[in-house]
Amino acid sequence: MQDIKIYEDKMNKSLDALLNDFGTIRAGRANPHVLDKIKVDYYGTPTPIQQVGNISVPEPRMIVIQPWERSLLKSISKAIQMSELGINPTNDGNVIRLVFPELTEERRKELAKDVKKKGDNAKVAMRNIRRDANDAFKKMEKAGDISEDEKAEAEERIQKLTDKMIEKVDKAVENKTKEVMTV
């Protein structure tokens, strides 16, 4: 019988990617994960900020970055300014502070739309994986590797898996939207 484990793994990876994406969406509180995609020029090598300094959240709307080498302060500030973060870093010569403004209602709605769009993209990815699985089952039946009944059973199992994964995506979207819309 065709094992659907490989398709389940692919769907789980899609869900993980979505959840990681959600981690970079700011919801009014300072979250160090917003810095995950920002790279700093460290002796000619693009390096994640987390690898060149200490990151802390002393207050709900502030992130403090303390680089291990003072010479990196300018590079880190520049990398943050060039990023899509939309926040101007303040550099006092020892640490860099990022103060997150309170989100406006309009910005919250934009973020909620973005969350929904990312969720929809994840669901499309899940359905594409289901389609690939069903195509594989049809080929196996045609080649005589599985019977028509086995193909039908495999298709039913992949459909149940897809429904379960789409439910998880919907739940994640609902939770993130609630978090973004909470003032």
Image (cartoon, rainbow, N blue to C red):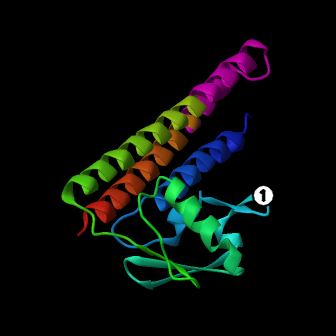
Please tell me which residue is depicted at 58% across the width and 36% down the height of the picture. 158
Query: Which SS does the magenta portion mostly show?
Result: helix
Farthest-out residue, top: 142
Q: Secondary structure at mark 1?
A: strand
Q: Is residue 88 left or right of residue 70?
A: left
User: Does residue 67 lie above or below 21 as drawn?
Assistant: below
Instruction: State which quarter of the image contains the C terminus.
Output: bottom left
Q: From which residue to which does the magenta span run?
A: 131-157
Residue 15 placed where, x, y %? 54, 50
Residue 156 belongs to the span the image colors magenta: yes
Name the image quarter holding residue 30.
bottom left
Residue 105 placed where, x, y %? 20, 58
Front-lying residue, 59 or 96: 96
Residue 40 placed where, x, y %? 66, 62
Q: Is residue 139 left or right of residue 120?
A: right
Front-lying residue, 7 or 74: 74
For the residue marked with disc 1, what is the amino acid? Thr
Name the image quarter holding residue 66.
bottom right
Residue 157 placed where, x, y %? 57, 38
Please tell me which residue is depicted at 65% across the width and 19% down the height of the picture. 148
Residue 6 belongs to the span the image colors magenta: no
Please tell me which residue is depicted at 27% across the width and 69% down the height of the picture. 102
Circle 1 packing at 10 Å, graded few (<14), some (14-19), many (20+), is few
Location of mark 1 (residue): 45
Instruction: State which quarter of the image contains the N terminus.
Output: top right
Please tell me which residue is depicted at 37% across the width and 59% down the height of the picture. 176
Name the image quarter holding residue 44.
bottom right
User: Does residue 134 lie above or below 170 as drawn?
Assistant: above
